[in-house]
Image (cartoon, coloured by chain):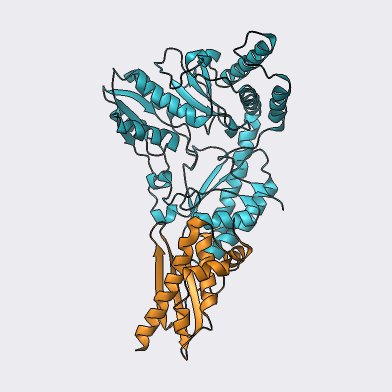
Chain colours: A orange, B cyan
């Protein structure tokens, strides 16, 4: 059903948790199923130094959130903010059609956390 | 990889003795039961014998058994047939909030054709109150349909009492007994039920075969026309191998029930007690005692059922969930909402249903794996 990478990120999710005193906090949800993801980020020198997630959702939602945090860490904030659902899908080796919303939610939560960090830094 | 199958409410594996009997039919008895020649007579004898076996298991007369393509057709035939036959008498149907979709969706479709329906609620254990049924019946009521036991949460309903009420009020009573026949004693001479749905693949028989018991004298209209089979109540050439499989499977299940059902109940009780100890804040669904012997239904707060199913599957355990996403449907199960669970808790539902292959070792593995999975998923959960 799922690619090896999806299974890996679901069974051993990276960056689980919430950063205390985070520079940015974001959330996105999937209205069609009630799933939601929260992402917190720490920014250092214009780069995503740390990103953590928590998800109430299906296996694909958890894998997507895990993957999007690994894609974000180490990237300049503006580059990380451009990570799309397609980037998450590609990195995961694809998801079944009905689960594309999970990748969208992960990318949305990251973007929302980075936008929050931007506002707060001003 | 070692697999542990705990989804017997979805379907049971075909008993090898049943598979052999069916293979023999396909090999050696390929006549049409309606044909007059020897090949036809042989097929007819097999269908008759299967009908006798199914009837004997529920203490019915063989003439009261109509073979169908499964539980869904049996439910459709019971509801549509009764409503159609009694259209001149009334137009009101009473059923419950936790019925299988084969019943609920059929009733809702009839509502679009002008039939009125009362959907009776259940308590937090999923139990129907017979008084609620009595209050819902009007002089326009033609049918009451209440399942014998719920497929998701396992609660066994008081159908004998509901049947007595229906009989007093002169209303036809249908019960979907798909989950109970083979697992509990179902005796139509003791339970005042007029129509009863059965499904072979829930008691180690083949998929695609079921039956509807129709008590002699019950008003009934056929839904399918054609060759006049099944005493003109369900046209179509009989699924000979299928009904042979069903008859044998039910005979075996009935014979083994006195030892098998208590064995499953003991394993299930150990499973639930163990999970309760090892998974904090676990929600147990269904009635604590009046329940199917093999059913364990739980909710793990803060976790999506789909995640539980996938994680268990990866650990070699097959289970199911009435919750969002797993079946492509995005709504939490209507049954879990009907017993008063919040959408969020209902989304974390997990159903483990035991069967003949289930051993103490299987339970040990689940008690080892599931708490680990629950705590891992909870650690990553956005719900505090």
Whether B42 is drawn above or below B157: the answer is: above
Residue nearest the viewer, comparing A94 with A108: A94
Give the quarter of the figure containing the C terminus of chain B: bottom left
Residue drawn at 39 percent across, 36 percent down: B105
| Relative vertical location of residue B42 with respect to residue A113 in this rendering, above or below | above
Figure quadrant of residue B104? top left
Spot the residue most to the bottom: A45
Residue B229 percent location from the top left of the image: 53, 15
Residue B188 seen by the camera = yes
Residue located 59% across and 44% down the image: B7
**What is the residue that sits farthest to the left in this orientation?**
B139
| Residue B326, percent from left and from top | 50, 51
Q: Where is residue B354 in the image (x, y as percent from the top left)?
A: 61, 42
B66 or A54: nearer the viewer? B66
The residue depicted at 58 percent of the width and 34 percent of the height is B202
- Picture quadrant of residue B259: top right
Residue B163 seen in this snapshot: no
Left or right of A103, for residue B257: right
Of all residues shown, which one is farthest toward the top?
A: B36
Return the x and y of residue B311 as percentages of the image width and height: 59, 58
* Position of B80 relative to B282 (above/below): above
Compared across the picture, whether B147 is left or right of B364 comes to: left
């Amino acid at each position: 059903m799922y690619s090896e990478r999806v299974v890996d990120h679901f069974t051993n999710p990276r960056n689980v948790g919430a950063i205390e005193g985070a520079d940015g906090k974001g959330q996105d949800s999937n209205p069609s199923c009630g799933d939601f993801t929260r992402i917190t980020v720490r920014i250092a020198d214009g780069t995503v130094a740390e990103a953590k997630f928590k998800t109430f959702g299906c296996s694909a939602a958890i894998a997507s959130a895990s993957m999007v945090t690994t894609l974000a860490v180490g990237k300049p904030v503006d580059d990380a903010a451009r990570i799309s659902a397609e980037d998450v899908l590609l990195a995961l080796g694809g998801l079944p059609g009905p689960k594309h919303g999970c990748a969208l939610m992960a990318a949305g939560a990251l973007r929302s956390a980075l936008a929050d960090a931007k506002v707060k830094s001003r | 990889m070692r697999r542990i199958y705990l989804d017997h409410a979805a379907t049971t594996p075909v008993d090898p003795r049943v598979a052999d009997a069916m293979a023999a039919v396909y090999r050696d008895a390929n006549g049409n039961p309606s044909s007059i020649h020897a090949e036809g007579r042989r097929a007819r004898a097999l269908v008759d014998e299967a009908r006798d076996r199914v009837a004997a298991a529920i203490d019915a007369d063989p003439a009261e058994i109509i073979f169908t393509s499964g539980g869904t057709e049996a439910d459709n035939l019971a509801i549509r047939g009764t409503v159609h036959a009694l259209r001149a008498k009334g137009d009101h149907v009473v059923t419950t909030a936790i019925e299988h979709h084969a019943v609920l969706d059929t009733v809702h479709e009839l509502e679009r054709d002008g039939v009125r329906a009362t959907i009776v609620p259940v308590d937090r254990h999923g139990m129907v109150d017979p008084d609620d049924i009595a209050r819902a019946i009007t002089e326009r009521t033609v049918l009451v349909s209440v399942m014998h036991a719920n497929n998701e949460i396992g609660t066994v309903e008081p159908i004998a009492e509901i049947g007595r009420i229906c009989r007093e009020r002169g209303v036809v009573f249908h019960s979907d007994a798909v989950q109970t026949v083979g697992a509990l004693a179902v005796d139509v001479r003791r339970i005042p039920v007029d129509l009863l749905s059965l499904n072979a693949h829930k008691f180690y028989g083949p998929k695609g075969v079921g039956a509807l018991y129709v008590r002699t004298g019950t008003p009934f209209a056929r839904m399918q026309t054609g060759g006049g089979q099944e005493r003109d109540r369900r046209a179509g050439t009989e699924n000979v191998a299928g009904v042979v499989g069903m008859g044998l499977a039910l005979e075996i299940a009935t014979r083994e029930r006195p030892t098998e059902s208590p064995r499953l109940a003991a394993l299930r009780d150990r499973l639930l007690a163990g999970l309760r100890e090892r998974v904090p804040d676990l929600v147990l669904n269904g009635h604590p005692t009046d329940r199917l012997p093999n059913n364990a239904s739980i909710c793990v707060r803060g976790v999506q059922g789909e995640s539980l199913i996938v994680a268990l599957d990866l650990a070699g355990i097959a289970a199911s969930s009435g919750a969002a996403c797993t079946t492509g449907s995005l709504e939490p199960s209507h049954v879990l909402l009907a017993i008063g669970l919040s959408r969020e808790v209902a989304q974390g539902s997990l159903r483990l249903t035991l069967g003949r292959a289930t051993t103490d070792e299987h339970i040990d593995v689940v008690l080892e794996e599931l708490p680990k999975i629950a705590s891992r998923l909870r650690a990553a959960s956005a719900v505090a």
